[in-house]
Image (cartoon, helix red, strand yellow):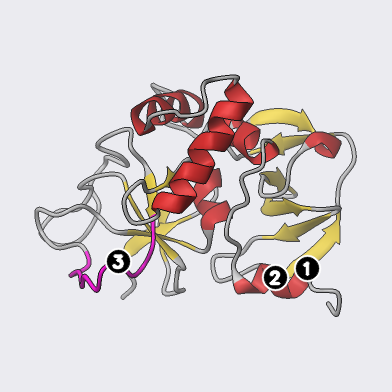
Amino acid sequence: MALQNRVTPAGEIVADPAKGTLMGNRGILHGADRTLGTSRWRHKAWIACTLDFKGIRRTIMEPGNYTELFFLDEATALAAGHRPCAECRRPAFRDFAAAFARADGEASTIRAGLIDRRLHACRVESYSRRQIRHEADASGLPDGAMILSDDAFWLVWSDRILRWRIDGYDRSAPGPDGIVTVVTPAVTVGALAAGYRPQLHESALSLLSPQA
């Protein structure tokens, strides 16, 4: 039976056998039986990590160790409120932090702790713990942002949107007009607009190829 460790663009943690291309961490969320409790995070450092780092092999949901979470791709992780890990994905973190700073008018360097605090304030509501979403004009959204439309999540890229599924993107459509519901946190949208380019799943690249 699939473990409950796959993350959707809404930040929800679900059980599904589909593979992920990035691993994440929000702290210890599981018990000895490898099932989740009620908590969906234990700290504000929601990170997205590489699947392979220095040859380290992990036992998934080992008692007393952090809960390994998995994402289809980095665009999914960003929508869910995560940011690149500053250790195993150091170059990506530096690029993200630089873009984050440019979007915020800050100095050229910005610490992970400040990013985490800013992200946490705009990714989940304090009491309901529901994802915070915002409205924006579709024409101004950067590549890599995700929107909610017709009960589905869509990745914005160039003049197209790609429909997200747990195991890959399955269709492409023209970009929408007017106001849309954005699920990617507002501060992350700012970093995307300032030049950060997230990694995409191979299914997205296939849909975006000239032959598609």
The N terminus lies in quadrant: bottom left
Where does the image place residue 190, in percent across and percent down from the top left? 64, 32
The residue under label 3 is: 53
> Closest to the observer: 104 or 13?
104
> Closest to the observer: 193 or 66?
193
Is 54 magenta? The answer is: yes
Give the side of residue 45 with respect to residue 35, left or right: right
Which quadrant holds residue 20?
Answer: bottom left
The C terminus lies in quadrant: bottom right
Where does the image place residue 196, in percent across and percent down from the top left? 61, 45
Element marked by disc 2: helix
In this view, the mark in front (3 or 1): 3
Could you give the CA–CA distance between mark 3 and mark 1, rounded to whole angstroms?
A: 29 Å
Q: Earlier in the sequence, mark 3 or mark 1?
A: 3
Magenta stretch in the rendered image: 49-60
Name the residue rendered at 27%, 40% in the picture: 39
Q: Earlier in the sequence, mark 2 or mark 3?
A: 3
Name the residue rendered at 49%, 36% in the picture: 97
Which quadrant holds residue 45?
Answer: top left
Could you give the CA–CA distance between mark 2 and mark 3, rounded to whole angstroms?
A: 24 Å
Q: Amino acid at mark 3?
A: Phe
> Closest to the observer: 136 or 141?
141
Name the residue rendered at 69%, 45% in the picture: 148
Q: Are marks 1 and 2 in contact (CB under 8 Å)?
A: yes
Q: Amino acid at mark 1?
A: Leu
Q: Is residue 28 above or below residue 62?
A: above
* Mark 1 crowdedness (10 Å alpha carbons): few <14, some 14-19, many ≥20: some
The residue under label 1 is: 208
The residue under label 2 is: 205
Where does the image place residue 7, in percent across and percent down from the top left? 44, 55
Name the residue rendered at 48%, 51% in the picture: 92
